[in-house]
Every structure is written in structure tokens, then in C-alpha cells.
Amino acid sequence: MIQALRNAFRLPDLRRRMLITALILVIYRLAAHVPVPNIKADLLAQVFAQNQLLNLLDMFSGGAMSNFSVMAMGVYPYITATIVIQLLQPIIPALEELAKEGEAGRNKLNQYTYLLTIPLCMMQAFALGVQLQSQGVVTNFGLSGSALLPTLTTILTMTAGTMFAIWLGELITEQGIGQGLSIIILGGIVARIPQRVGAMLATDVRGLIAFLIITAVTVAVIVIVQEGQRRIPVQYGKRVLAMRGNRLRIAGGQGTHIPLRVNSAGMIPLIFAQSFMMLPGVISYYFLNAGTPWVKSTATAIYNLFNAQSNFYWILYFFLVVGFTYFYTDIIFQQQDLAGNLKRQGGFIPGIRPGKRTEDYLNKVLRRITLVGAIFLGAVAILPWLAQGVTETSTMLITSSGLLIVVGVVLDTMRQLEAQLLMRHYEGFIKT
């Protein structure tokens, strides 16, 4: 791999792409340390230590939210908008038709995603500001009196920061190496590892060693599962294209396969499940000091039940991840319409009739292998809870979602570099 990196850096085009990627990451990290005015940094650190939802959003902002910087929203509103557009495609026929129109349709869907990102970012910035103001972290924030102008300025600044982060990600995709938005998130996750390692070295060396072993094993399992696939054989019938004298020109007849991935949902189920689990706790938090006794007691019970210290939280989290994995995988698979595409192209699965029979067969195989991916994602999601029994702490060097992002982004970037090197007759990163 080291030699492959050297080969990549010797090539002017790849060297330029790698340097552009590094430069953009430096620009993003610098911008992530420009704070919004009127912030009490000491109280902000305490709030983030107690709020899991903020920590999740902080991961997608590349660490910018923990500083409440102008880039605090990161690319999370864009990710949310992308998921919403994907989920709406089976429901809204116009969006489904755009998805089938090739490059032009995808560009139109991207425009809708960008437009949806702006209001989502503004609402998220306002909600975050209100929440932090209620805890004394933010001052002079609201929609009344003298706070109106500073509030609007903060919301517009953070929205502009999100769009700037998305633009930087697009630049990496076009001019650099890898998928830009994923690279930005990866940079934020990796940047926080030295701080956590230093903290554990000072307080719990044994726990650090245990977590290093757990992380290494988890990464190996993630690579195996992420790369795992079931290959469905496909045969294409022979077709007569034209006559050449007394000879027929025949095309087709070759065989190929459809790769069905064990985990085709990525880390989206973890985001869905974690957001769902955090919602009751976030809502009940605002009623902990209610004047009505039964409201206060109910809010306290819900808050304790949906807290990361509760065993119920982790058990329900596991089953939600498994359920959302099936849900999201089924939506994505239906959008692809593999059975219909095979029939239109003259392809068929040996022993299976084209059309409905093929669709049923593919669904059956997909649901069977998705069980492995769903249980795997569920196990990764509750890894901090499982590791707590070994290390007596649930603080991980990298969160479960972060591990999936890091491994996925690294593998994707390695494939892109490998493709570039193989085009120039160099040996790639990934051995086959």
C-alpha cells in the first residue's frame, strides 16, 4: 500500500488531486474553528457531554458543532434532504420519473435537494440556538426585541456555512479524490481521535488498550461485511442485429451477475434509529421541571428510559436498527427495479422466469442476506454498550457510526485511487 501511495504521488494528475483534497480539508477545519458570537464555551462543553443528539450532529459537522462555529450545521441538513428526496421518490410519481431520466433527471433531483437543504438548515440552526439559550450557552437569541437581528444574522451565517461546506465537498468530488462530503465528515472524525487517545492515556491506559483491540476487530468485521455480496448469475439471450451477406450478425449470449450487497443500506439505519431514540428524551427534557406533578414524573420516567445509561435504550436501539435496515434496503431496491431492467434488456436468471418470478426471487434473496447485514449493523450500533462490560466505560475512540463512515470512505477512496493507478499500469491498493 505504501508503494502504491508513492506511485500515486509520482503521477502529476493524482498528486494534484491529492493536494487539492488536503488543501480543502485544511480550509474546512480552519472554518470549523470560527465561532458564532455570544457563546459561553465552558457551558457549551458541558452540554455536549450530556446530549447524544448534539454529539451525533457534531460528527456530521466534522467537529464544528462542538465549537458552535459558522460551520456548525456541517453537511447534515444536506444528508437529511437527500434522504427525504429518496424516500419521496416512490410516493411522488414526478420524482420517480426524474430518477429514471438519467443524468438530466439526477441533476434536477440534486437541485431539489439543494433547495430543500436551505430551509432545513435554517430550522435546525434556530432550534439549536433556542435549545442552547435555554441552557445558558447562547445569549441574545430569539425572535423578539433586540435579539431579532442577531438571531437572523446567526441563522443566515450558519446556513451560509452549510452551503459553503457542501460546495467544498463538491470541489473534492470534482477536483480531488473520493466522495467530497464523506471526506469532510471523515476529516472531522479522525481529527478528534488524538484528543480522545490523550484523555484515555491520562486516565485509563487499560481501557485504551482494550478499545484499540475492539476497534481493530470491529474494523476488520466491517470490511468483511461491507465488501460481502451475493452474486446472482444473469444470462443474456442472443439477438440478431443485421445480415452481412450470407452471415447473421449476432449479439448477446454472454453471462454476467448482479451483486447484491450484504449491507446495501450503509449507515442510514443507524441515523434513523438514533434520531428516533433521541426524540423522546429531547422532548421530555423540557418537562423535567414542570409544575404539574404527574407531568414531571412522566417526563422523568421517559427521560431515564431513553437515556444511554438504560439497558432498555440499547436493546430497543438494536431492534430499531434491524427494522430500519430492512425498511431502507427495500426502498432502495424497489427504486432500482432490477427485474424490470433485466426483462427490457433481454436478460434472465437461469431457472427463473423473467418478470414477476424474477422480482420475487431477488426479493427473497435480498431479504435473506439483509438479515446478516441488519444484525451486523445492530451489533455495531450497540458496541459501546457491549464494550462497557469489558472496559467499564462506553466512551469509544470512534463512535459506531463514525467507524462505518471511516471504513466506507477509506475503501471508496482506495478504489478510486486503484482505478486511476490501474489505468496507468500500476499495482493498486486492493489485492484481488
Image (spheres, rainbow, N blue to C red):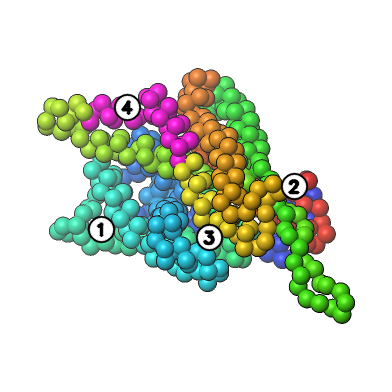
Is residue 315 shown in magenta?
yes
Distance in Å between CA atoms under marks 4 and 2: 45 Å
Determine crowd level at label 3: few under 14, some 14-19, many 20+ residues with C-alpha closer than 10 A: many
**Nearest to N terminus: mark 4 or mark 2:** 4
The amino acid type of the residue labelled 3 equals Gly
- Say which residue label 3 marks: 169
Q: What secondary structure is marked by label 2?
A: loop
Q: Which residues are magenta?
A: 299-325
The residue sitting at 44% across, 56% down in the picture is: 90
Tags 3 and 4 touching, CB below 8 Å = no
Dot 4 amino acid type: Leu
Query: What amino acid type should be assigned to the residue bearing mark 2?
Result: Ile
The disc placed on residue 305 is: 4
Q: Nearer the viewer, mark 3 or mark 1?
A: 3
Image coordinates for residue 89, horizontal then vertical, percent: 44, 59
Callouts 4 and 2 close, C-beta under 8 Å: no
**Residue at the disc numbered 1:** 151
Q: Which mark is residue 430?
A: 2
State the SS at label 4.
Answer: helix
Tag shown at residue 226: none
Q: Is residue 394 above or below residue 340?
A: above
Of the residues under marks 1 and 2, which one precedes in the sequence?
A: 1
Q: Residue furthest left?
A: 292
Residue at 84 percent across and 78 percent down: it is 244
Of mark 3 and mark 1, the one earlier in the sequence is 1
Which is closer to the viewer, label 1 or label 2?
A: 2
CA distance for labels 3 and 2: 25 Å
Distance from the alpha carbon under mark 3 to that under mark 1:
27 Å
Q: Tags 3 and 1 in contact by the CB under 8 Å rule? A: no
Residue closer to the observer: 17 or 375: 375
Residue 237, placed above or below residue 224: below
